[in-house]
Amino acid sequence: EYVIKQEGPDNIAAFIAEPIVGATAGALVPPKEYYPIIREICDKYDIVMIGNWSKIKRHEVLFRSIRKMPYGNRVRVALIGYEHHGRKKEHIIQDARRYGVQENITIFENISAEEVAQVLRESKVNVLLSRGEGANRGIYEGLFSGNVLVVYKYNKGVNMNIVNENTGYLATDENLHVVLAQAIENYYDFHTA
């Protein structure tokens, strides 16, 4: 983590490690908790949500679900968006505060495509909760970044064929907290990228 911070995450392409360090080190094997710690450093956010700040994106549904999760206080969420019809970042923070999850979120507003891609690569689960959406670009960007998808089950407009056993889950408002927990816990079982 120190090297990533020193060099800057934009300058680090990958983490490469030998599972057993060679003969010069006496065939050392790292402790079992080593790779999970590395994975956590590389996956900065559990959940990412891309969209403007309008109510139709249903950020409140996400916040309510995080609060219901058994370890919700540890869930790290990246919200990527921009002002829309008078709804501003401050409204999102206010909504998060109402559900007691404001400490869980990091907001990225009006960032470049390169910065969006970086946040996606640092995330595990990409969430789309709107009820109506066309061919949402964020879903495809998330797939190419290796994110597990969680899409609102009754969404009208998204090609639901892209959400399958290899890419993610469909969720309702009622079971979203359970589905998010499953997606985070089973992240390594998916092969989306």
Image (cartoon, rainbow, N blue to C red):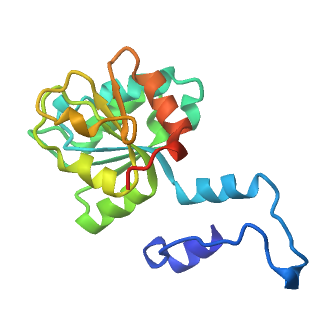
Residue 79, image quadrant: top left
Residue 81 appears in the figure:
no
Give the percent coordinates (x, y) of residue 181. Answer: 51, 30
Instruction: Identify the residue at horizontal 58%, vertical 70% (top origin).
Output: 15
Left/right placement of residue 50 relative to residue 149 reads left
The residue lying furthest to the right in this view is 26
Q: Quadrant of residue 19?
A: bottom right
Q: Is residue 62 above or below residue 43?
A: above
Residue 138 image position (x, y, % from top left):
24, 49
Rendered position, 65 above or below 92:
above
The residue at 12%/39% (across/down) is: 86
Residues 98 and 14: in front is: 14
Q: Position of residue 126 (x, y in %)?
A: 35, 43
Left or right, residue 170 beside residue 100: left
Give left or right: position of 42 versus 83: right
The quadrant the N terminus occupies is bottom right
Report the number of discs. Answer: 0
The structure residue drawn at horizontal position 21% and vertical position 42%, both measured from the top left corner, is 88
Residue at screen point 24% across, 64% down: 113
